[in-house]
Amino acid sequence: MLNISGILEGFVLDHIQAGMSLQIYHDLKLDTLDCCVAIIKNAKSSKMGKKDIIKVECPIDALDLDILGFIDHNITVNIIKNEKIVEKRPLSLPKEIRNVIRCRNPRCITSVEQGLDQIFTLTDAEKPVYRCKYCETKFKGRRRVG
């Protein structure tokens, strides 16, 4: 049986859709952090059938919860201190995201001005639909960050 030790201080991302952990690892830029990261793929789950888990031993400040909420707001974020879960942070769709997706409108100012932030605002949480702040072009659903 696989044994991955507990972490002293950090966070555990639980209930990740099976097979999505490596994408989330790169999207959150965990590869740039100087900390211990464990990725568990296809773990058994009574709720989901299979799931992925990411354990990170570093302060929670290193995690961008807005990006994580955009990727999948059903992920559970467990905050760990002294090897115990001290808080479970729920995720939600962020009202605004910056530099996560790009505007598909070739006439948008963000397509021409390279230094301008790509800013999208949530306009419909049911679907979800985000609109470009500058040209109002729609982006439906969630997809890979980048």
Image: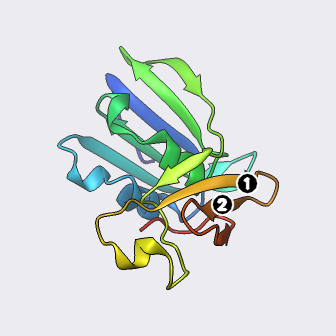
Q: Could you tell me which residue is drawn at 28 percent across and 32 percent down?
A: 58
Q: CA distance from mark 2 to mark 1?
A: 6 Å
Instruction: Residue 138: give x, y in percent of width and height.
Output: 67, 70
Q: Is residue 129 above or below residue 5?
A: below
Splitting the image into 4 quarters, where does residue 9 fall?
A: top left
SS type, badge 1: strand
Instruction: Residue 94: give x, y in percent of width and height.
Output: 60, 44
Of 58 and 73, the residue lying toward us: 73
- The residue type indicated by label 1 comes to Thr
Q: Exactly how many numbered labels are in the figure? A: 2
Most extreme residue toward the bottom, as rendered? 106
Asked whether disc 2 touches disc 1, contact meaning CB atoms under 8 Å apart, the reply is yes
- Viewer can see residue 13: yes
* Residue 65: mark in rendering: none
Which residue is labeled 2 in the image? 130
Q: Could you tell me which residue is drawn at 67 percent across and 46 percent down?
A: 74
Splitting the image into 4 quarters, where does residue 115 fall?
A: bottom left
Instruction: Residue 60: give x, y in percent of width and height.
Output: 38, 30
Q: Quadrant of the C terminus?
A: bottom left
Of 142 and 50, the residue lying toward us: 142
- The residue type indicated by label 2 comes to Tyr
SS type, badge 2: strand
Residue 52 falls left or right of residue 8: right
- Viewer can see residue 16: no
Which residue is labeled 1 in the image? 123
